[in-house]
Image: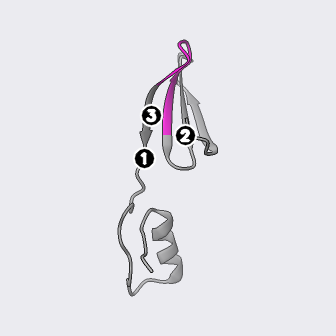
């Protein structure tokens, strides 16, 4: 499991599985009884990889929001 801060936890209703989410968007599903990770996945951000270099018509706040959602800006 990653060393990034955990941002969310949830158990299934039987208490046998634990879902753990972190700040980077990684999600792990733990099997509590066997103490193993059953599933791990990385959730992509909505604008991940979108190049916004030299974009025009957007405010600074809008550009920063796109970057927070995964867009990239090359210098």
Residue at 43% across / 83% down in the picture?
A: 58
Residue 41 position (above or below residue 67): above
Q: Which disc is residue 43 wearing?
A: 1
Contact check, label 3 and label 1, Cβ < 8 Å: no
Quadrant, the C terminus: bottom left
Residue sitting farthest toward the left: 50
Q: Secondary structure at mark 1?
A: loop
Residue at 42% across / 56% down in the picture?
A: 45
Span shown in magenta: 27-37
Q: Residue 37's spot in the image, x, y percent?
A: 49, 25
Question: Which label's residue is closer to the chain start, 1 or 2?
Answer: 2
Question: Which label's residue is closer to the chain start, 3 or 2?
Answer: 2
Cα–Cα span, label 1 and label 2: 10 Å
The part of the image, by quadrant, that contains residue 20 is: top right
Instruction: Bin the neighbour count of mark 2 within 10 Å (Cα to Cα): few under 14, some 14-19, many 20 and up.
Output: many
Contact check, label 1 and label 2, Cβ < 8 Å: no
Residue sitting farthest toward the right: 5
Mark 3 highlights which residue?
Answer: 40
Q: Is 57 on the left or on the right of 34, as rendered?
A: left
Residue 47 position (above or below residue 9): below
Viewer-side label of 3, 1: 3
Viewer-side label of 3, 2: 3
Residue 14 position (above or below residue 39): above
Q: Which disc is residue 21 wearing?
A: 2
Of 15 and 4, the residue lying toward us:
4
Residue sitting farthest toward the bottom: 57
Of 44 and 4, the residue lying toward us:
4
Residue at 56% across / 17% down in the picture?
A: 35
Q: Secondary structure at mark 3?
A: strand
Cα–Cα span, label 3 and label 1: 10 Å
Quadrant, the N terminus: top right
């Amino acid at each position: 499991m990653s060393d990034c801060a955990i941002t969310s936890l949830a158990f299934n209703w039987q208490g046998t599985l634990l879902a753990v989410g972190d700040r980077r968007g990684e999600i792990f599903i733990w099997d509590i009884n066997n103490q193993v990770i059953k599933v791990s996945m990385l959730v992509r951000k909505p604008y991940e990889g979108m190049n916004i270099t030299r974009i025009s018509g957007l405010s600074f706040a809008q550009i920063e929001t796109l970057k927070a959602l995964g867009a990239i800006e090359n210098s």
